[in-house]
Amino acid sequence: MAERKKGLRCNICTGCGLCPGVTAETGQFKRLHVLGAEAGAAHSGIRQPLDGGGRRLVAVDIGTTTIAMLLYREDGTVEDRYMAVNPQAVYGADVLSRIRAAADAAAAADMRDQVRKVLGKGIRRFQKKLAPGEKLHMVLAANTTMSYLFQGIDVQELGRAPFLVSHPRWGDMEIEGVPCYGFPCFSAFVGGDILAGIFACGMAAREELTLLIDLGTNGEIVLGNRSGRIACATAAGPAFEGGPNRGVWGADMVSILAALRRAGCVDETGLLAEEFFETGIRVGNVLVTKEAVRSLQLAKAAVAAGIEVLLKKYGAEASEVGSVVLAGGFGYYLNPADAALIGLLPPALAERTAAGGNTALAGCLAAGRILFADGRAALEARLGEIVEGTEIVNLAQEPFFEEIYIKQINF
């Protein structure tokens, strides 16, 4: 489990699913009740059955940084958790580093085996919780690189143009005798974890236009509703994980920069006031330097430009978006008003933005309900419809992306 800081916040986010997802309506937050996601089922008092006929569901989020596993009871509540740092980190902090490392067959095999060992530890822990005759069944979500490495598929096509994905769907597989179902991937940089997020927040089932944003080193953004969706990935770099201020929460850096803007210590171009330009300015125990400001500027510009491109291609205005779901630990603590002030989010969306918690795990729970109730074919049909109805945009190929990106650098 993540280390807790004074009982209020984890020092390190492991994507454990403890943070409850919420959604916003006219500025007031309420619990997210969509598709039986953990945010609704486990935290709102709703107890939807998860009858697997002796099968117990394990939801797994194989993240680039952390691996999170949840064991569910038959009433849909969480019985146990197993979390670990992704041991592949020794090969690099981001997916591109691991793709390069995986050019060596021995390194690729080690990355596969290390993650399987982590899941094996979680499985053995959970098996001690089972009643006689019960068996585990896993539903997994992962980005495309993690999916390839976990399955032992050569990842080299993911790291070079035209960034093809020859294996978007998982084959039949078991880990220590436990059958696994993995969310299919959209593209090289929009993976099954994002499909799980779409599934969890009910985007493909509702008429309301929804924006799903998952921020990290690689940020994924999806816009749409039941009529169709459009998605992209944008390279945010390490700024949302502290950047030059590594160890400081990205959400906190957003709020610090917003406070400096309000105080006039940073201008609209990102320049610190003259008296702080060389030495930086200390806010609490955080020293904000011009390098830290620039890092966050470039990251927020990439995300903001991605949002603007999706809105433009979808033919919608920001004011038409009914709700914004921020996925993950970063989104859980992000202040939407501060994000809007520095230009990370369109101002029109600040009052409609809320945290979604770990939407990958929530999507696994939602998928597990269908898998147990209606079978694998029914689940694959549902997910296949979402994939077919979602257009993936390569921002680098959009003729107006660079212009929008440069414009969005300013606060």
Image: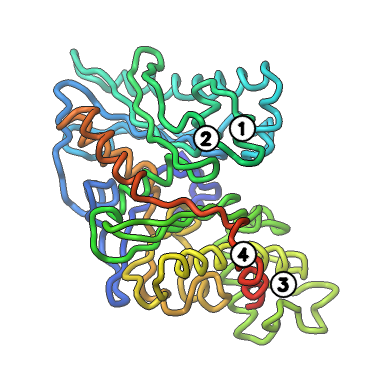
Q: Report crowding for label 4: few under 14, some 14 to 19, many 20 or more residues within 10 A (C-alpha).
A: few
Residue linked to disc 2: 165
As measured in the structure, the alpha-carbon distance from the residue carrying label 3 to the one carrying label 2 is: 46 Å
- Amino acid on which the number 4 mark rests in the picture: Pro
Please, what secondary structure does the residue beneath circle 1 have?
Answer: helix
Residue at the image position 47 percent from the left and 61 percent from the top: 333
Marked residue nearer the N-terminal end (3 or 2):
2
- Amino acid on which the number 1 mark rests in the picture: Glu
Q: Residue 115 at what x, y percent from top left?
A: 52, 25
Q: Is residue 95 above or below residue 359?
A: above
2 or 4: mark nearer the eye: 4
The numbered dot on residue 282 is 3
Q: Is residue 58 above or below residue 2?
A: above
3 or 2: mark nearer the eye: 2
The numbered dot on residue 399 is 4
Residue linked to disc 1: 157
Residue most extreme to the bottom: 264
Marked residue nearer the N-terminal end (3 or 4):
3
As measured in the structure, the alpha-carbon distance from the residue carrying label 2 to the one carrying label 4 is: 24 Å
Residue at the image position 56 percent from the left and 33 percent from the top: 86
Residue at the image position 51 percent from the left and 25 percent from the top: 150
Please, what secondary structure does the residue beneath circle 3 have?
Answer: strand
Q: Is residue 161 above or below residue 71?
A: below
Q: How is the image coloured?
A: rainbow
Can residue 352 be seen? Answer: yes
Mark 1 in CB contact with mark 4 (< 8 angstroms): no
- Amino acid on which the number 2 mark rests in the picture: Val
Viewer-side residue, 86 vs 111: 111
Marked residue nearer the N-terminal end (2 or 1):
1
Please, what secondary structure does the residue beneath circle 4 have?
Answer: loop
Q: Residue 374 at what x, y percent from top left?
A: 16, 31
Viewer-side residue, 67 vs 143: 143
